[in-house]
Structures are given as C-alpha cells and as structure tokens.
Amino acid sequence: MTNNELQSYLRHKETKVFEMDTFWKTQARGTNDQEYQIYLSCANDGKGIDFTTGNKLKTYDEWVSS
C-alpha cells in the first residue's frame, strides 16, 4: 500500500486541514457492557430519559445497534 492509501484527508479550499490514518481508532474504554454502562451513567437524566435527545434511554440491544 502507498502512503496515500493509508491516510485520509479533510480539505478546505485545497488546504489539508485534517489527516487521519486508516488504522486510527478511538481509545478503548472497555467491553461493550462497560461502554453501555458509561452511556447510561452519562446520558440518564435520573428519570430514564436520555438528556441529549429527550428520548427514553436505549436498551442494550438498541444501543449496540445504533
């Protein structure tokens, strides 16, 4: 593979403003179960509503599928 195949670029008016390696990923914070618990603890308004959307919190299956 060439270097261009391994990288993606975001350009604005022909100027490269962001470069991302193909193998870049977010930092792992644990298992899906642990990630779901983070979602619940951060998004829950205390009444079972996701304060970021105003909707009912997602079930585990809904969350995994989203």
Image: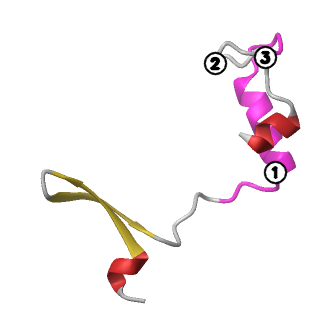
Bounds of the magenta segment: 28-48
Q: Nearer the viewer, residue 55 or 28?
A: 55
Residue at coordinates 78% horizontally, 37% vertically from top-left?
Answer: 63
> Which residue matches tag 2?
53
Residue at coordinates 74% horizontally, 14% vertically from top-left?
Answer: 45
Asked whether the residues under the numbered discs 3 and 1 touch, taking CB atoms below 8 Å apart as contact, a structural biologist would say: no
Q: Is residue 46 magenta?
A: yes
Q: Which amino acid, by three-letter code, is at mark 2?
A: Thr
Q: Is residue 23 above or below residue 61?
A: below
Q: Is residue 58 magenta?
A: no
Q: Quadrant of the N terminus?
A: bottom left
> Which residue matches tag 1?
32
Disc 1 secondary structure class: helix
How did the renderer colour the structure?
Answer: secondary structure
CA distance separating discs 3 and 1? 20 Å
Q: Quadrant of the C terminus?
A: top right
